[in-house]
Image (cartoon, coloured by chain):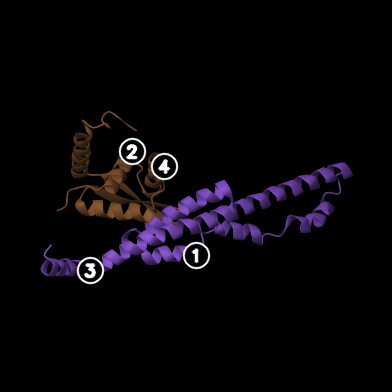
Chain colours: A purple, B brown
Amino acid sequence: VKKHIEEAEALEPVGKTLDELWQQFEVLNDDDRAKLKAGIREEKRRIDDCLATLRRQTAPPPQLAESLISLLAPKKSADAQLGDLQEIFQENVKRFGLERARRMYCIRISREVGPLLLQKLMRWLERFGIIALLIDYGRTKLGF
Amino acid sequence: MDTTLKQTEQVVMLAIMRKHPDAYGVSIFEELAKRLEKEVAMATIYATLDKLEKKGFVKSRQGAATAERGGRAKMFFEITGKGQAALNASLNALDRLRSGTKLSGVTA
């Protein structure tokens, strides 16, 4: 989609070439020329609207927030989690607009950070067997 | 191996069953938000799914990547036979506990 946007943006704006086009339509009377000109302007406006919509719909979520998730989430599910969050983000862009969707995304990510940090800590503790060590220590010292 | 189910595990498994065969992160998240009337963090859902997979109660498969997900693939989940039996046993135990109390016969 981004490639198509770039291609469309690279095209020469219709307005610039209109005067050259008119010379080729000398056979048309003034009324027909005006109608044709209006038609072309309307089409150009529609294309601009489509491009703006496409740009909004393909806008990526805030990068910093995304990086935070990829850093904290387990490797196995990080991609799926980021994909899910982006899907929700795109849905919110359609419903509430880009700015609000970005704010909602940041709020959502801030809520995800707590559980992700806790999970990362637990994984780290499990890896080094600290929990088992603490339990053993508790058992021997405190007798539970 | 641990075959007991915590409440979070129960609700996630029930959401997977409700969304079958389209149970993936977003659909599970939305189902939980709709039925529980509160949002569960995506990280919590995935952590629960990971535990359930390790216990052999759910299995996952990779879906196709889509543009609206930034080219990232979906991860679909389904309950295994063992998971279904464990969920059934767990919910039956709750029902047995509930019967004979003021709450018996009360459903959501």
Closer-to-camera residue (A10/B98): B98
Q: Is residue A117 above or below residue A93?
A: below
Mark 3 → mark 1, Cα distance in angstroms: 30 Å
**For discs 1 and 4, the disc positioned in front in the rendered view:** 4
Closer-to-camera residue (A77/B48): B48
Q: Which residue is mark 3?
A: A127
Residue B75 seen in render: yes
- Determine whether, in the image, residue A55 is placed left or right of residue B82: right
Instruction: Establish whether labels 4 and 2 are both on one chain.
Output: yes
* Image coords of residue A94 (percent x, y): 56, 48
Indicate the amino acid at tag 4. Glu
Q: Are marks 4 and 2 in contact (CB under 8 Å)?
A: no
Q: Chain of mark 2?
A: B
Q: Which residue is mark 4?
A: B37
Mark 1 → mark 2, Cα distance in angstroms: 33 Å
Label located before the other in sequence (4 or 2): 2
Labelled disc at residue B18? 2
Q: Secondary structure at mark 4?
A: loop
* Image coords of residue B86 (percent x, y): 19, 43
Q: Secondary structure at mark 1?
A: helix
Q: Are marks 1 and 2 in contact (CB under 8 Å)?
A: no
Q: Which residue is mark 1?
A: A63
Instruction: Establish whether labels 4 and 3 are both on one chain.
Output: no
Mark 1 → mark 4, Cα distance in angstroms: 30 Å
Indicate the amino acid at tag 2. Arg
Q: Chain of mark 1?
A: A
Closer-to-camera residue (B106/A52): B106
